[in-house]
Amino acid sequence: MKQMNHRYQTSDYMEWDTAMSLIRKLYRDGNYRMSLLVGCGCFFGLRISDILTLTWEMLLSDDKFVLNEKKTGKRRVVKINSDFQQHIHKCHDALNIQNDSEKCFISQKKMVYSTQRINVLLKLIKKQYNLKIEHFSTHTFRKTFGRKVFESAGENANMALIKLSELFNHSNVSITKIYLGIREKELLQTYDLLDF
């Protein structure tokens, strides 16, 4: 179990533009489910265990959905970005989904993908699309979401960290900073304060 946690801590985030480009390329190349999975990870900031519970109905019937997080048991309301919801509709149509109560991320055998299988697929995607990211896994997208929210906040960065800390269910903002790789960057900037 400890090794698994360590692996999550070392996942890297993607630059937002790179992630959006990957979603579009996967869709263009007919890999609709992985396009949707990367999008859900980046736009919802959910753990993979929660993403795998999503049904088409949850994503298409409203501009938000509710779920109970598997890890924490906490109720979570997630708002769906309107532009991303259009992409969800496109994936739904491209996959010719007949049953909207079906889970979104199922294999050809009609089984929900395992986290391990998705990580194998992500390794292939990293190679196929020549992604410049060292530690690429299902957790990458949750971190990508967090970095985008933090970086977009500008002067309100501290408020964004407080909100992210609550969304991620971290016990304090310091953990969120470490999680997003912000703490080390801030510490290294200390050296730039010195004059010669």
Image: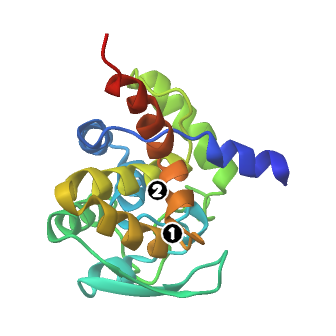
Q: Mark 2 or mark 1: which comes first in sequence?
A: 2
Task: Work out whether residue 134 or residue 113 is closer to the camera in this orientation and state it.
Answer: 134
Q: Is residue 142 above or below residue 77?
A: above
Compared across the picture, whether 64 is left or right of 107 comes to left
Quadrant for the C terminus in the image: top left
CB atoms of marks 2 and 1 within 8 Å: yes
Q: Name the spot of residue 133 as percent of width and height, x first.
A: 46, 28
Q: Is residue 67 above or below residue 144?
A: below
| Residue 34 in sight in this render | yes
Residue appearing at x 53%, y 38% in the figure: 122
Residue at the far top: name it. Answer: 196
Q: Name the spot of residue 81 as percent of width and height, x first.
A: 21, 70
**Type of amino acid at the residue the image marks with label 2:** Arg
Q: Is residue 41 above or below residue 194?
A: below
Q: Name the spot of residue 70 as percent of width and height, x first.
A: 64, 78
Task: Work out whether residue 78 or residue 151 is closer to the camera in this orientation and state it.
Answer: 151
Report the residue marked by disc 1.
Answer: 168
| Residue 96 in sight in this render | no
Report the residue marked by disc 2.
Answer: 142
Compared across the picture, whether 65 is left or right of 127 comes to left
Q: Is residue 148 above or below residue 45?
A: above
Q: Quadrant of residue 145?
A: bottom left
Query: Within 10 Å of the Cα at label 2, are there few (<14), some (14-19), or many (20+) other Cα atoms?
Result: many
Task: Work out whether residue 142 or residue 65 is closer to the camera in this orientation and state it.
Answer: 142
Colour basis:
rainbow
Q: Secondary structure at mark 1?
A: loop
Quadrant for the N terminus in the image: bottom right
Marks 2 and 1, how far apart at CA? 9 Å
Query: Within 10 Å of the Cα at label 1, are there few (<14), some (14-19), or many (20+) other Cα atoms?
Result: some
Residue appearing at x 55%, y 55% in the figure: 108
